[in-house]
Image (tube, rainbow, N blue to C red):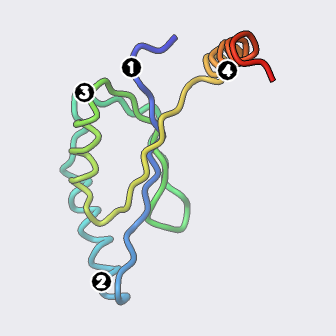
């Protein structure tokens, strides 16, 4: 069982008005990334980029959502979606427990 919450973080570049804005955003993102260090309170299990576009996915772990908030604020040129995730075995056990409770306490 995991002690700290794990989340899937989806990110993609914000749409721009012109190719010049798009190119400037890409350059700025790379400048920031060269200097950025992953905060101590944040563990990246995977940090992936979708081939052919500025965006991707990360599997992150933290017990402090403010750390994710700081990372998101650093990269204002991206749109983010954060989704809590869990190991499939843990999820199956939790679902079985929920179903058992429902069947015992609120039968159809």
What crowding class fits label 2: few (fewer than 14 Cα within 10 Å), some (14-19), or many (20 or more)?
few
Residue farthest toward the right in the current orientation of the protein: 108
Q: Which residue is mark 1?
A: 4
Q: Which dot, 4 or 1, sits closer to the camera? A: 4
Q: Which residue is mark 3?
A: 41
Q: Are marks 4 and 1 in contact (CB under 8 Å)?
A: no
Q: What residue do we see at 81% from left, 24% from top? A: 108
What is the distance, in whole Å, between disc 2 and disc 3 at their CAs? Answer: 33 Å
What is the distance, in whole Å, between disc 2 and disc 4 at their CAs? Answer: 46 Å
- At mark 4, the secondary structure is helix
- Name the N-terminal-most of marks 1 and 3: 1
Of 51 and 98, nearer the camera is 98
- At mark 2, the secondary structure is helix
Where residue 65 sits: x, y (%)? Answer: 28, 34
Q: Which residue is mark 2?
A: 21
- Name the N-terminal-most of marks 2 and 3: 2
- Name the N-terminal-most of marks 2 and 4: 2
- At mark 1, the secondary structure is loop
What crowding class fits label 4: few (fewer than 14 Cα within 10 Å), some (14-19), or many (20 or more)?
few
**Viewed as shown, does residue 17 lie left or right of 102?**
left
Where residue 85 sits: x, y (%)? Answer: 53, 32
Q: What residue do we see at 48% from left, 41% from top? A: 83
- Name the N-terminal-most of marks 4 and 3: 3
**Viewed as shown, does residue 41 lie left or right of 103?**
left
- Name the N-terminal-most of marks 2 and 1: 1
């Amino acid at each position: 069982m995991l002690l700290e919450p794990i989340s899937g973080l989806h990110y993609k570049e914000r749409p721009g008005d012109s190719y010049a804005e798009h190119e400037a955003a890409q350059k700025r993102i790379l400048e920031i990334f060269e200097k950025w260090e992953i905060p101590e309170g944040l563990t990246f299990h995977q940090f992936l980029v979708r081939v052919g576009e500025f965006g991707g996915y990360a599997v992150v772990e933290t017990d402090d959502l403010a750390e994710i908030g700081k990372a998101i604020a650093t990269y204002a040129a991206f749109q983010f979606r954060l989704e809590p995730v869990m190991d499939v075995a843990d999820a199956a056990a939790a679902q079985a427990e929920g179903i058992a409770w429902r069947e015992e306490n609120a039968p159809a």
